[in-house]
Amino acid sequence: MTSIIPFLRQNTFDPETTKMMGEAYEAACGELGHNGAPALVKEVIAKRIIDAAQKGERDPQRLCAKALDALGMSGRYL
């Protein structure tokens, strides 16, 4: 299990939002396959989820989709 928490510089999110972001992060990383993803890819995923959450997105599926879109994998999760 991976966590988005190490990527949060300042955790300005409430616990429920942090949980949703974590779910989206785990789902996006899971879409990359069983071999896992390089650290840089995980960082991109986390940053996209954090950016979307800062703009008000709270749905884990949409957060995941936004992260995957940054990797050219749009439409695979929703």
Image (tube, helix red, strand yellow):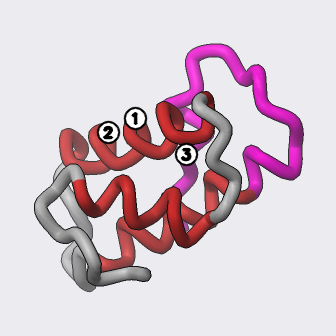
Please tell me how crowded label 1 is: few (under 14), some (14-19), or many (20+) other residues with Cα within 10 Å: some
Would residue 16 be counted in the magenta stretch?
yes
Q: What label sits on residue 37 in the rendered view?
A: none
Q: Secondary structure at mark 3?
A: loop
Which image quadrant is residue 34 in? bottom left
Give percent across and percent down for residue 37: 22, 61
Give percent across and percent down for residue 71: 16, 56
Q: Amino acid at mark 2?
A: Glu
Q: Secondary structure at mark 1?
A: helix
Looking at marks 2 and 3 on the same chain, the residue that comes earlier in the sequence is marked by: 3
Q: Nearer the viewer, mark 1 or mark 2?
A: 1
Q: In the drawing, does residue 15 fall left or right of residue 27?
A: right
Q: Secondary structure at mark 2?
A: helix
Q: In the drawing, does residue 8 fall left or right of residue 34?
A: right
The magenta stretch is: 1-19
Disc 1 to disc 2: CB gap under 8 Å:
yes
Q: What label sits on residue 43 in the rendered view?
A: 2
The residue that mark 1 highlights is: 47
In this rendering, the answer to whether 6 lies above or below 19 is: above
Please tell me how crowded label 3 is: few (under 14), some (14-19), or many (20+) other residues with Cα within 10 Å: many
Q: CA distance from mark 2 to mark 3?
A: 9 Å
In this rendering, the answer to whether 56 lies above or below 67 is: above
Q: What label sits on residue 4 in the rendered view?
A: 3
Give percent across and percent down for residue 15: 87, 43
Q: Quadrant of the N terminus?
A: bottom right
